[in-house]
Image (tube, rainbow, N blue to C red):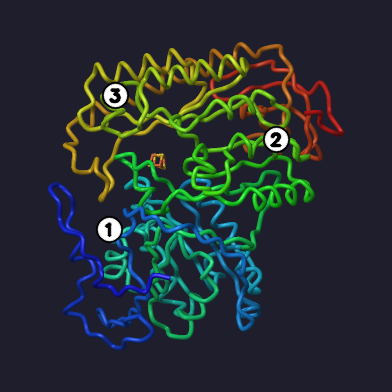
Amino acid sequence: MNKEGPNSTDIKSVKGERDYSNYFDFSSAKVVKEQSGATTYRIGGRDITINSAPSYQDEKRRGKEGVQVHYDFNIPEEMHQFGRGKHYMIRTYGCQMNEHDTETMKGMLEQMGYTATEDKNEADIILLNTCAIRENAEDKVFGELGHLKPLKTLKPSLLLGVCGCMPQEETVVNKILQKYPYVDLIFGTHNIHRLPKLIKEAYLSKEMVVEVWSKEGDIVENLPKKREGLKAWVNIMYGCDKFCTYCIVPYTRGKERSRRPEDVLTEVRELARQGFKEVTLLGQNVNAYGKDFEELNYTLGDLLDDIRKIDIPRVRFTTSHPRDFDDRLIEVLAKRGNLVEHIHLPVQSGNNEILKRMSRKYTRESYLELVSKIKKAIPEVVLTTDIIVGFPGETEEQFQDTLSLVREVGFESAFTFIYSPRAGTPAASMEDNVPEETKKMRLIQLNETVNEFSRRSNEALKGSVVEVLVEGQSKTNPEFLSGRTRTNKLVHFAGPAHLTGSFVHVRITEPQTWALKGEIVRMDETVVV
Ligand code: SF4
Protein backbone atom coordinates (compact mmCIF):
# COMPACT_ATOMS: atom_id res chain seq x y z
CA MET A 1 0.00 0.00 0.00
CA ASN A 2 1.20 3.44 -0.85
CA LYS A 3 1.54 5.49 2.27
CA GLU A 4 3.35 8.44 0.81
CA GLY A 5 2.64 11.78 2.34
CA PRO A 6 1.01 14.68 0.58
CA ASN A 7 4.29 16.34 -0.34
CA SER A 8 5.69 13.27 -2.02
CA THR A 9 4.83 14.30 -5.57
CA ASP A 10 7.86 15.63 -7.33
CA ILE A 11 6.77 16.04 -10.91
CA LYS A 12 8.70 18.69 -12.67
CA SER A 13 6.83 20.97 -14.93
CA VAL A 14 7.66 20.03 -18.50
CA LYS A 15 7.05 22.26 -21.45
CA GLY A 16 3.35 22.72 -21.99
CA GLU A 17 2.40 20.43 -19.12
CA ARG A 18 0.72 21.64 -16.03
CA ASP A 19 2.96 21.93 -12.98
CA TYR A 20 1.53 19.44 -10.52
CA SER A 21 4.23 19.93 -7.94
CA ASN A 22 2.26 22.53 -6.01
CA TYR A 23 -0.94 20.62 -5.77
CA PHE A 24 -0.16 18.96 -2.50
CA ASP A 25 2.05 21.62 -1.09
CA PHE A 26 0.28 22.39 2.15
CA SER A 27 3.40 23.86 3.72
CA SER A 28 1.31 26.71 5.09
CA ALA A 29 -1.39 24.34 6.45
CA LYS A 30 -1.27 23.30 10.08
CA VAL A 31 -0.22 19.69 10.69
CA VAL A 32 -2.53 18.36 13.41
CA LYS A 33 -0.98 14.91 13.68
CA GLU A 34 1.22 12.40 11.90
CA GLN A 35 0.53 8.73 12.49
CA SER A 36 1.31 5.46 10.67
CA GLY A 37 2.32 7.27 7.50
CA ALA A 38 -0.83 9.44 7.41
CA THR A 39 -0.77 13.18 7.99
CA THR A 40 -3.71 15.18 9.30
CA TYR A 41 -3.86 18.83 8.24
CA ARG A 42 -6.21 21.57 9.27
CA ILE A 43 -7.31 23.45 6.16
CA GLY A 44 -10.02 26.11 6.41
CA GLY A 45 -11.17 24.73 9.78
CA ARG A 46 -11.52 21.15 8.44
CA ASP A 47 -9.25 18.33 9.53
CA ILE A 48 -8.10 16.32 6.53
CA THR A 49 -6.26 13.02 6.94
CA ILE A 50 -4.23 12.09 3.92
CA ASN A 51 -3.33 8.39 3.98
CA SER A 52 -1.98 8.66 0.47
CA ALA A 53 -2.41 11.28 -2.24
CA PRO A 54 -2.60 10.78 -6.01
CA SER A 55 0.68 11.11 -7.82
CA TYR A 56 0.66 11.76 -11.54
CA GLN A 57 4.26 10.64 -11.81
CA ASP A 58 3.69 7.32 -10.02
CA GLU A 59 0.62 6.62 -12.15
CA LYS A 60 2.67 7.04 -15.29
CA ARG A 61 5.38 4.62 -14.16
CA ARG A 62 5.47 1.07 -15.51
CA GLY A 63 7.91 -1.03 -13.48
CA LYS A 64 8.95 -4.64 -13.66
CA GLU A 65 7.38 -5.91 -10.45
CA GLY A 66 4.83 -8.69 -10.91
CA VAL A 67 1.13 -8.39 -10.23
CA GLN A 68 0.00 -9.68 -6.86
CA VAL A 69 -3.34 -11.49 -6.82
CA HIS A 70 -5.04 -11.28 -3.43
CA TYR A 71 -7.58 -13.93 -2.47
CA ASP A 72 -7.95 -12.95 1.18
CA PHE A 73 -10.58 -10.21 1.01
CA ASN A 74 -13.07 -10.10 3.85
CA ILE A 75 -15.20 -7.49 5.57
CA PRO A 76 -13.69 -6.85 9.00
CA GLU A 77 -15.73 -8.50 11.76
CA GLU A 78 -16.51 -5.20 13.48
CA MET A 79 -17.98 -3.81 10.22
CA HIS A 80 -20.49 -6.63 9.59
CA GLN A 81 -23.37 -4.78 11.25
CA PHE A 82 -22.01 -1.26 10.78
CA GLY A 83 -24.67 -0.31 8.20
CA ARG A 84 -27.63 -1.96 9.92
CA GLY A 85 -30.66 0.35 9.75
CA LYS A 86 -28.73 2.70 7.42
CA HIS A 87 -29.12 3.43 3.70
CA TYR A 88 -26.66 3.99 0.90
CA MET A 89 -26.87 5.61 -2.49
CA ILE A 90 -24.24 5.43 -5.25
CA ARG A 91 -24.29 7.69 -8.29
CA THR A 92 -22.27 6.23 -11.14
CA TYR A 93 -20.74 8.22 -13.99
CA GLY A 94 -18.90 6.92 -17.06
CA CYS A 95 -18.19 3.53 -18.53
CA GLN A 96 -19.16 -0.08 -17.79
CA MET A 97 -16.00 -0.45 -15.72
CA ASN A 98 -17.38 2.12 -13.31
CA GLU A 99 -20.82 0.49 -13.37
CA HIS A 100 -19.14 -2.76 -12.44
CA ASP A 101 -17.08 -1.13 -9.66
CA THR A 102 -20.37 0.22 -8.32
CA GLU A 103 -21.74 -3.34 -8.21
CA THR A 104 -18.72 -4.28 -6.11
CA MET A 105 -19.20 -1.36 -3.71
CA LYS A 106 -22.91 -2.19 -3.40
CA GLY A 107 -21.94 -5.79 -2.61
CA MET A 108 -19.60 -4.66 0.18
CA LEU A 109 -22.08 -2.14 1.61
CA GLU A 110 -24.86 -4.74 1.71
CA GLN A 111 -22.55 -7.20 3.46
CA MET A 112 -22.08 -4.44 6.03
CA GLY A 113 -25.84 -4.28 6.56
CA TYR A 114 -26.62 -1.17 4.49
CA THR A 115 -29.81 -1.02 2.37
CA ALA A 116 -29.99 0.67 -1.04
CA THR A 117 -32.05 3.81 -1.53
CA GLU A 118 -32.69 6.14 -4.45
CA ASP A 119 -33.78 8.94 -2.10
CA LYS A 120 -30.80 11.09 -1.16
CA ASN A 121 -32.69 12.45 1.87
CA GLU A 122 -32.89 8.92 3.25
CA ALA A 123 -29.24 8.08 2.55
CA ASP A 124 -26.66 7.83 5.34
CA ILE A 125 -23.87 7.41 2.86
CA ILE A 126 -23.68 8.85 -0.66
CA LEU A 127 -20.85 7.88 -2.98
CA LEU A 128 -20.16 9.52 -6.34
CA ASN A 129 -18.33 6.98 -8.50
CA THR A 130 -16.75 9.32 -11.01
CA CYS A 131 -15.40 9.39 -14.56
CA ALA A 132 -12.36 11.39 -15.68
CA ILE A 133 -12.50 10.77 -19.40
CA ARG A 134 -13.91 14.19 -20.35
CA GLU A 135 -14.10 17.54 -18.71
CA ASN A 136 -17.88 17.76 -18.86
CA ALA A 137 -18.13 14.45 -16.97
CA GLU A 138 -16.05 16.06 -14.22
CA ASP A 139 -18.12 19.24 -14.25
CA LYS A 140 -21.25 17.16 -13.60
CA VAL A 141 -19.65 15.69 -10.49
CA PHE A 142 -18.59 19.08 -9.14
CA GLY A 143 -22.14 20.32 -9.86
CA GLU A 144 -23.58 17.37 -7.92
CA LEU A 145 -21.25 18.05 -5.00
CA GLY A 146 -22.60 21.62 -4.95
CA HIS A 147 -26.19 20.32 -4.91
CA LEU A 148 -25.42 18.00 -2.02
CA LYS A 149 -24.00 20.74 0.20
CA PRO A 150 -27.37 21.84 1.72
CA LEU A 151 -28.22 18.20 2.50
CA LYS A 152 -24.87 17.67 4.20
CA THR A 153 -25.39 20.88 6.21
CA LEU A 154 -28.84 19.71 7.34
CA LYS A 155 -27.61 16.19 8.08
CA PRO A 156 -24.00 16.30 9.27
CA SER A 157 -24.01 12.53 9.95
CA LEU A 158 -24.33 11.92 6.17
CA LEU A 159 -21.08 10.45 4.84
CA LEU A 160 -20.30 11.96 1.46
CA GLY A 161 -17.65 10.24 -0.65
CA VAL A 162 -16.02 10.77 -4.04
CA CYS A 163 -14.40 7.74 -5.66
CA GLY A 164 -13.51 6.26 -9.05
CA CYS A 165 -11.31 7.86 -11.69
CA MET A 166 -11.47 11.55 -10.76
CA PRO A 167 -9.68 11.16 -7.40
CA GLN A 168 -6.73 9.62 -9.28
CA GLU A 169 -6.09 13.15 -10.61
CA GLU A 170 -4.05 15.47 -8.43
CA THR A 171 -5.96 18.52 -9.67
CA VAL A 172 -9.30 17.03 -8.70
CA VAL A 173 -8.31 16.07 -5.17
CA ASN A 174 -6.75 19.46 -4.63
CA LYS A 175 -9.94 21.15 -5.85
CA ILE A 176 -12.13 19.09 -3.52
CA LEU A 177 -9.85 19.85 -0.58
CA GLN A 178 -10.00 23.56 -1.29
CA LYS A 179 -13.58 24.04 -2.49
CA TYR A 180 -15.68 21.17 -1.15
CA PRO A 181 -14.43 20.70 2.43
CA TYR A 182 -17.71 19.02 3.44
CA VAL A 183 -16.74 15.87 1.50
CA ASP A 184 -15.85 13.11 4.01
CA LEU A 185 -14.08 10.51 1.93
CA ILE A 186 -11.97 10.42 -1.22
CA PHE A 187 -10.58 7.20 -2.67
CA GLY A 188 -9.56 5.98 -6.11
CA THR A 189 -9.81 3.00 -8.41
CA HIS A 190 -7.10 0.81 -6.84
CA ASN A 191 -8.41 0.58 -3.28
CA ILE A 192 -12.15 -0.03 -3.65
CA HIS A 193 -11.68 -3.14 -1.50
CA ARG A 194 -10.67 -0.84 1.37
CA LEU A 195 -14.16 0.74 1.44
CA PRO A 196 -15.28 -0.85 4.74
CA LYS A 197 -12.11 0.31 6.51
CA LEU A 198 -12.27 3.78 4.97
CA ILE A 199 -15.91 4.22 6.02
CA LYS A 200 -14.98 3.28 9.56
CA GLU A 201 -12.04 5.69 9.56
CA ALA A 202 -14.12 8.59 8.21
CA TYR A 203 -17.02 7.95 10.63
CA LEU A 204 -14.89 7.58 13.72
CA SER A 205 -12.40 10.37 13.02
CA LYS A 206 -14.97 12.87 11.66
CA GLU A 207 -12.12 14.02 9.44
CA MET A 208 -12.04 14.07 5.66
CA VAL A 209 -10.09 10.93 4.72
CA VAL A 210 -8.09 10.88 1.49
CA GLU A 211 -6.63 7.58 0.31
CA VAL A 212 -5.70 7.38 -3.36
CA TRP A 213 -3.19 4.76 -4.44
CA SER A 214 -1.02 5.55 -7.42
CA LYS A 215 0.57 2.13 -7.72
CA GLU A 216 0.53 0.18 -10.96
CA GLY A 217 -2.07 -2.09 -9.46
CA ASP A 218 -2.78 -5.54 -8.07
CA ILE A 219 -5.79 -7.79 -8.48
CA VAL A 220 -8.16 -8.39 -5.60
CA GLU A 221 -10.38 -11.46 -6.01
CA ASN A 222 -13.47 -12.59 -4.11
CA LEU A 223 -14.99 -9.14 -3.76
CA PRO A 224 -18.76 -9.31 -3.20
CA LYS A 225 -20.92 -7.96 -6.03
CA LYS A 226 -24.53 -6.94 -6.24
CA ARG A 227 -25.67 -7.84 -9.74
CA GLU A 228 -29.17 -7.29 -11.06
CA GLY A 229 -31.01 -8.03 -14.28
CA LEU A 230 -30.25 -10.45 -17.09
CA LYS A 231 -26.80 -9.28 -18.02
CA ALA A 232 -23.58 -9.36 -16.02
CA TRP A 233 -20.22 -7.72 -16.45
CA VAL A 234 -17.08 -9.69 -15.72
CA ASN A 235 -13.71 -8.01 -15.46
CA ILE A 236 -11.07 -10.03 -17.24
CA MET A 237 -8.32 -7.46 -16.93
CA TYR A 238 -7.55 -4.08 -15.48
CA GLY A 239 -5.56 -1.05 -16.57
CA CYS A 240 -4.01 -0.02 -19.85
CA ASP A 241 -0.46 0.35 -21.16
CA LYS A 242 -1.34 1.88 -24.51
CA PHE A 243 -1.01 5.54 -23.46
CA CYS A 244 -2.99 7.00 -26.35
CA THR A 245 -1.99 10.64 -26.16
CA TYR A 246 -5.50 11.99 -25.44
CA CYS A 247 -6.44 9.44 -22.79
CA ILE A 248 -6.26 9.63 -19.00
CA VAL A 249 -7.12 5.95 -18.38
CA PRO A 250 -3.55 4.55 -18.15
CA TYR A 251 -2.96 7.05 -15.32
CA THR A 252 -6.23 6.45 -13.47
CA ARG A 253 -6.43 2.66 -13.84
CA GLY A 254 -2.83 1.46 -13.68
CA LYS A 255 -0.99 -1.07 -15.78
CA GLU A 256 -2.46 -3.89 -17.84
CA ARG A 257 -3.00 -6.88 -15.59
CA SER A 258 -5.06 -9.95 -16.37
CA ARG A 259 -7.16 -12.01 -14.01
CA ARG A 260 -6.18 -15.67 -13.89
CA PRO A 261 -8.24 -17.74 -16.40
CA GLU A 262 -9.50 -20.07 -13.66
CA ASP A 263 -10.88 -17.11 -11.68
CA VAL A 264 -12.69 -15.71 -14.74
CA LEU A 265 -14.07 -19.10 -15.76
CA THR A 266 -15.30 -19.84 -12.23
CA GLU A 267 -17.10 -16.50 -12.16
CA VAL A 268 -18.74 -17.04 -15.57
CA ARG A 269 -19.83 -20.57 -14.58
CA GLU A 270 -21.39 -19.19 -11.41
CA LEU A 271 -23.25 -16.51 -13.41
CA ALA A 272 -24.57 -19.22 -15.74
CA ARG A 273 -25.73 -21.19 -12.70
CA GLN A 274 -27.52 -18.09 -11.39
CA GLY A 275 -29.40 -17.80 -14.68
CA PHE A 276 -27.78 -14.75 -16.26
CA LYS A 277 -28.46 -14.64 -19.99
CA GLU A 278 -25.50 -12.59 -21.12
CA VAL A 279 -22.02 -11.73 -19.89
CA THR A 280 -19.80 -8.95 -21.15
CA LEU A 281 -16.11 -9.44 -20.52
CA LEU A 282 -14.63 -6.11 -19.50
CA GLY A 283 -11.27 -4.45 -19.74
CA GLN A 284 -9.85 -1.19 -21.06
CA ASN A 285 -7.96 -3.17 -23.68
CA VAL A 286 -9.33 -6.72 -23.58
CA ASN A 287 -7.26 -7.80 -26.56
CA ALA A 288 -4.16 -7.53 -24.41
CA TYR A 289 -5.60 -10.19 -22.09
CA GLY A 290 -2.95 -12.66 -21.03
CA LYS A 291 0.02 -10.73 -22.40
CA ASP A 292 1.21 -10.14 -18.84
CA PHE A 293 1.17 -13.84 -17.86
CA GLU A 294 4.73 -14.96 -17.42
CA GLU A 295 4.35 -18.72 -17.22
CA LEU A 296 1.21 -19.09 -19.27
CA ASN A 297 0.55 -18.76 -22.98
CA TYR A 298 -3.15 -17.90 -22.90
CA THR A 299 -4.85 -15.08 -24.79
CA LEU A 300 -8.33 -13.58 -25.15
CA GLY A 301 -8.99 -16.08 -27.96
CA ASP A 302 -8.17 -18.96 -25.60
CA LEU A 303 -10.35 -17.50 -22.86
CA LEU A 304 -13.31 -17.08 -25.23
CA ASP A 305 -12.81 -20.60 -26.55
CA ASP A 306 -13.18 -21.87 -22.97
CA ILE A 307 -16.13 -19.59 -22.18
CA ARG A 308 -17.82 -20.82 -25.36
CA LYS A 309 -18.22 -24.18 -23.63
CA ILE A 310 -20.08 -22.66 -20.67
CA ASP A 311 -23.86 -22.74 -20.82
CA ILE A 312 -24.51 -19.02 -20.93
CA PRO A 313 -26.49 -17.85 -23.99
CA ARG A 314 -24.55 -14.75 -25.01
CA VAL A 315 -21.02 -13.54 -24.51
CA ARG A 316 -19.67 -10.10 -25.49
CA PHE A 317 -16.42 -8.31 -24.77
CA THR A 318 -15.33 -4.69 -24.66
CA THR A 319 -13.25 -2.68 -25.32
CA SER A 320 -11.01 -3.83 -28.13
CA HIS A 321 -7.83 -2.21 -29.33
CA PRO A 322 -7.17 -2.96 -33.02
CA ARG A 323 -3.44 -3.35 -32.42
CA ASP A 324 -3.86 -6.41 -30.19
CA PHE A 325 -6.74 -8.03 -32.11
CA ASP A 326 -5.09 -11.25 -33.28
CA ASP A 327 -5.87 -14.10 -35.69
CA ARG A 328 -6.49 -16.57 -32.87
CA LEU A 329 -9.32 -14.34 -31.62
CA ILE A 330 -10.88 -14.12 -35.07
CA GLU A 331 -10.65 -17.90 -35.45
CA VAL A 332 -12.45 -18.45 -32.12
CA LEU A 333 -15.12 -15.79 -32.77
CA ALA A 334 -15.88 -17.48 -36.08
CA LYS A 335 -16.95 -20.59 -34.13
CA ARG A 336 -19.91 -18.45 -32.93
CA GLY A 337 -22.12 -20.43 -30.49
CA ASN A 338 -22.60 -18.05 -27.60
CA LEU A 339 -19.96 -15.66 -29.01
CA VAL A 340 -22.09 -13.00 -30.66
CA GLU A 341 -21.51 -11.40 -34.07
CA HIS A 342 -20.88 -7.89 -32.78
CA ILE A 343 -17.45 -6.33 -32.37
CA HIS A 344 -16.84 -2.86 -31.01
CA LEU A 345 -13.54 -1.80 -32.56
CA PRO A 346 -12.57 1.81 -31.75
CA VAL A 347 -10.76 3.44 -34.69
CA GLN A 348 -10.68 7.09 -33.49
CA SER A 349 -9.51 8.49 -36.85
CA GLY A 350 -9.13 7.41 -40.47
CA ASN A 351 -5.98 9.41 -41.09
CA ASN A 352 -2.50 8.03 -40.50
CA GLU A 353 -0.94 11.28 -39.34
CA ILE A 354 -3.67 11.80 -36.73
CA LEU A 355 -3.47 8.15 -35.66
CA LYS A 356 0.27 8.62 -35.17
CA ARG A 357 -0.23 11.74 -33.09
CA MET A 358 -2.86 9.91 -31.07
CA SER A 359 -0.24 7.13 -30.62
CA ARG A 360 -2.79 4.52 -31.59
CA LYS A 361 -0.02 2.25 -32.96
CA TYR A 362 -1.89 1.11 -36.10
CA THR A 363 -2.51 2.63 -39.50
CA ARG A 364 -5.61 3.14 -41.59
CA GLU A 365 -4.38 0.31 -43.82
CA SER A 366 -3.76 -2.16 -41.00
CA TYR A 367 -7.16 -1.33 -39.48
CA LEU A 368 -8.90 -1.97 -42.81
CA GLU A 369 -6.96 -5.20 -43.22
CA LEU A 370 -8.15 -6.34 -39.79
CA VAL A 371 -11.74 -5.44 -40.69
CA SER A 372 -11.47 -7.39 -43.89
CA LYS A 373 -10.15 -10.49 -42.03
CA ILE A 374 -13.00 -10.26 -39.52
CA LYS A 375 -15.64 -9.87 -42.26
CA LYS A 376 -14.21 -12.79 -44.17
CA ALA A 377 -14.37 -15.04 -41.08
CA ILE A 378 -17.76 -13.71 -39.83
CA PRO A 379 -19.66 -12.28 -42.84
CA GLU A 380 -22.72 -11.25 -40.77
CA VAL A 381 -20.62 -9.35 -38.19
CA VAL A 382 -21.80 -5.91 -37.04
CA LEU A 383 -18.95 -3.49 -36.41
CA THR A 384 -19.28 -0.42 -34.22
CA THR A 385 -16.62 2.08 -33.21
CA ASP A 386 -15.46 5.19 -31.34
CA ILE A 387 -14.32 8.29 -33.23
CA ILE A 388 -12.84 11.60 -32.09
CA VAL A 389 -13.17 14.69 -34.29
CA GLY A 390 -11.15 17.86 -33.99
CA PHE A 391 -7.97 16.31 -32.57
CA PRO A 392 -5.23 18.99 -32.39
CA GLY A 393 -4.10 19.88 -35.90
CA GLU A 394 -6.81 17.86 -37.70
CA THR A 395 -7.24 19.36 -41.18
CA GLU A 396 -10.36 19.13 -43.32
CA GLU A 397 -8.60 16.62 -45.53
CA GLN A 398 -7.66 14.45 -42.55
CA PHE A 399 -11.25 14.58 -41.32
CA GLN A 400 -12.43 13.50 -44.78
CA ASP A 401 -10.18 10.43 -44.38
CA THR A 402 -12.20 9.54 -41.29
CA LEU A 403 -15.46 9.88 -43.23
CA SER A 404 -14.16 7.73 -46.05
CA LEU A 405 -13.04 5.05 -43.58
CA VAL A 406 -16.49 5.08 -41.96
CA ARG A 407 -18.01 4.48 -45.40
CA GLU A 408 -15.49 1.81 -46.30
CA VAL A 409 -16.06 -0.19 -43.12
CA GLY A 410 -19.81 0.55 -42.92
CA PHE A 411 -19.97 0.96 -39.13
CA GLU A 412 -23.52 0.44 -37.97
CA SER A 413 -23.17 2.72 -34.97
CA ALA A 414 -20.46 4.82 -33.36
CA PHE A 415 -19.73 6.75 -30.21
CA THR A 416 -18.56 10.05 -31.63
CA PHE A 417 -16.83 12.76 -29.65
CA ILE A 418 -15.42 16.22 -30.03
CA TYR A 419 -11.83 16.26 -28.78
CA SER A 420 -11.33 17.95 -25.44
CA PRO A 421 -7.96 18.02 -23.67
CA ARG A 422 -7.38 16.17 -20.39
CA ALA A 423 -4.83 17.71 -18.05
CA GLY A 424 -1.75 15.56 -17.69
CA THR A 425 -2.06 13.77 -21.04
CA PRO A 426 0.49 14.44 -23.84
CA ALA A 427 -2.23 15.74 -26.20
CA ALA A 428 -3.09 18.46 -23.68
CA SER A 429 0.23 20.11 -24.53
CA MET A 430 -0.54 20.08 -28.29
CA GLU A 431 -2.06 23.21 -29.73
CA ASP A 432 -5.85 22.70 -29.70
CA ASN A 433 -6.18 24.68 -32.92
CA VAL A 434 -9.35 23.37 -34.56
CA PRO A 435 -12.05 26.03 -34.04
CA GLU A 436 -14.98 24.92 -31.90
CA GLU A 437 -17.42 25.65 -34.72
CA THR A 438 -15.43 23.43 -37.12
CA LYS A 439 -15.36 20.62 -34.55
CA LYS A 440 -19.14 20.83 -34.19
CA MET A 441 -19.67 20.81 -37.97
CA ARG A 442 -17.42 17.78 -38.33
CA LEU A 443 -19.32 15.96 -35.60
CA ILE A 444 -22.63 16.63 -37.38
CA GLN A 445 -21.23 15.41 -40.68
CA LEU A 446 -19.78 12.31 -39.07
CA ASN A 447 -23.02 11.48 -37.26
CA GLU A 448 -24.99 11.88 -40.48
CA THR A 449 -22.65 9.44 -42.22
CA VAL A 450 -22.86 6.86 -39.42
CA ASN A 451 -26.66 7.23 -39.30
CA GLU A 452 -26.89 6.65 -43.02
CA PHE A 453 -25.09 3.31 -42.63
CA SER A 454 -27.08 2.39 -39.56
CA ARG A 455 -30.34 3.04 -41.43
CA ARG A 456 -29.14 1.16 -44.48
CA SER A 457 -28.12 -1.94 -42.50
CA ASN A 458 -31.37 -1.87 -40.52
CA GLU A 459 -33.40 -1.66 -43.72
CA ALA A 460 -31.61 -4.73 -45.02
CA LEU A 461 -33.12 -6.62 -42.08
CA LYS A 462 -36.72 -5.93 -43.15
CA GLY A 463 -38.65 -9.19 -43.33
CA SER A 464 -35.94 -11.26 -41.63
CA VAL A 465 -36.33 -13.03 -38.28
CA VAL A 466 -33.90 -12.18 -35.48
CA GLU A 467 -33.32 -13.67 -32.04
CA VAL A 468 -34.07 -11.12 -29.29
CA LEU A 469 -33.29 -11.26 -25.59
CA VAL A 470 -36.32 -9.52 -24.02
CA GLU A 471 -35.11 -6.89 -21.56
CA GLY A 472 -38.48 -5.52 -20.42
CA GLN A 473 -41.23 -3.09 -21.31
CA SER A 474 -40.41 -0.31 -23.72
CA LYS A 475 -39.65 2.98 -21.95
CA THR A 476 -42.01 4.88 -24.23
CA ASN A 477 -44.92 2.44 -24.66
CA PRO A 478 -45.74 -0.17 -21.96
CA GLU A 479 -47.60 -2.34 -24.49
CA PHE A 480 -44.33 -2.88 -26.27
CA LEU A 481 -41.35 -4.92 -25.17
CA SER A 482 -37.75 -4.09 -25.92
CA GLY A 483 -34.78 -6.31 -26.35
CA ARG A 484 -31.48 -6.76 -28.15
CA THR A 485 -30.35 -8.95 -31.02
CA ARG A 486 -27.07 -10.85 -30.87
CA THR A 487 -25.60 -7.94 -32.81
CA ASN A 488 -26.81 -5.57 -30.06
CA LYS A 489 -29.53 -3.89 -32.11
CA LEU A 490 -32.51 -2.57 -30.19
CA VAL A 491 -35.84 -4.16 -31.16
CA HIS A 492 -39.38 -3.09 -30.10
CA PHE A 493 -42.38 -5.38 -30.50
CA ALA A 494 -45.78 -5.99 -28.91
CA GLY A 495 -45.86 -8.73 -26.27
CA PRO A 496 -46.69 -9.64 -22.70
CA ALA A 497 -44.40 -8.46 -19.88
CA HIS A 498 -43.82 -12.02 -18.63
CA LEU A 499 -41.55 -12.63 -21.62
CA THR A 500 -38.90 -10.46 -19.97
CA GLY A 501 -35.76 -12.51 -19.60
CA SER A 502 -36.58 -14.98 -22.35
CA PHE A 503 -35.49 -15.26 -25.95
CA VAL A 504 -38.03 -14.69 -28.72
CA HIS A 505 -37.83 -14.62 -32.48
CA VAL A 506 -39.04 -11.40 -34.04
CA ARG A 507 -39.76 -10.61 -37.68
CA ILE A 508 -38.57 -7.11 -38.54
CA THR A 509 -41.38 -5.06 -40.05
CA GLU A 510 -40.30 -1.46 -39.59
CA PRO A 511 -36.59 -0.69 -39.60
CA GLN A 512 -35.59 2.74 -38.27
CA THR A 513 -32.25 4.47 -37.93
CA TRP A 514 -31.45 3.49 -34.34
CA ALA A 515 -33.95 0.72 -33.67
CA LEU A 516 -36.05 -1.98 -35.31
CA LYS A 517 -39.76 -2.62 -34.91
CA GLY A 518 -41.19 -6.07 -35.44
CA GLU A 519 -43.58 -8.83 -34.41
CA ILE A 520 -43.00 -12.02 -32.49
CA VAL A 521 -43.03 -15.13 -34.61
CA ARG A 522 -41.77 -17.61 -32.03
CA MET A 523 -41.15 -17.79 -28.30
CA ASP A 524 -38.39 -20.10 -27.19
CA GLU A 525 -38.36 -22.07 -23.99
CA THR A 526 -34.70 -22.65 -24.44
CA VAL A 527 -32.23 -21.02 -26.69
CA VAL A 528 -30.33 -22.92 -29.26
CA VAL A 529 -27.01 -21.17 -29.68
S1 SF4 B 1 -6.30 1.90 -25.41
FE1 SF4 B 1 -8.19 2.90 -24.71
S2 SF4 B 1 -7.96 3.06 -22.49
FE2 SF4 B 1 -5.93 2.65 -23.30
S3 SF4 B 1 -4.99 4.65 -23.57
FE3 SF4 B 1 -5.95 4.13 -25.55
S4 SF4 B 1 -8.01 5.01 -25.46
FE4 SF4 B 1 -7.21 4.99 -23.36
**Residue at 65% across / 36% down in the picture?**
304
460 to 25, vertically: above or below: above
27 to 254, vertically: above or below: below
**Residue at 33% across / 64% down in the picture?**
54
Check contact, mark 1 vs mark 2: CB within 8 A. Answer: no
Instruction: Estimate the spatial distance between the alpha carbons at disc 3 and disc 1, rounded to whole Å.
Output: 37 Å
Of the pair 478 and 449, the residue shown nearer to us = 449
Instruction: Estimate the spatial distance between the alpha carbons at disc 3 and disc 2, rounded to whole Å.
Output: 38 Å
Check disc 1 and report its element: helix, strand or loop.
Answer: helix
Q: Amino acid at mark 1?
A: Gln
Looking at marks 1 and 2 on the same chain, the residue that comes earlier in the sequence is marked by 1
Which residue is most to the front?
Answer: 295
Counting from the top left corner in percent of width and height, residue 478 is at 70, 37
Check contact, mark 3 vs mark 2: CB within 8 A. Answer: no
| Mark 2 neighbour density, 10 Å: few (under 14) some (14–19) many (20 or more) | many
Mark 1 — residue?
Answer: 57
Q: Amino acid at mark 2?
A: Arg
Looking at marks 3 and 2 on the same chain, the residue that comes earlier in the sequence is marked by 2
| Mark 1 neighbour density, 10 Å: few (under 14) some (14–19) many (20 or more) | some
User: Ligand 1 near label 1 (Cβ, under 8 Å)?
Assistant: no
Quadrant where the N terminus sits is bottom left
Select label 3 or label 1 by which is in front. 1
Mark 3 — residue?
Answer: 441
Mark 2 — residue?
Answer: 314
Q: How many marks?
A: 3
337 to 229, vertically: above or below: above
Counting from the top left corner in percent of width and height, residue 127 is at 49, 64
403 to 216, vertically: above or below: above
**Residue at 57% across / 38% down in the picture?**
299
Q: Answer with the quarter of the image where residue 515 lies.
A: top right
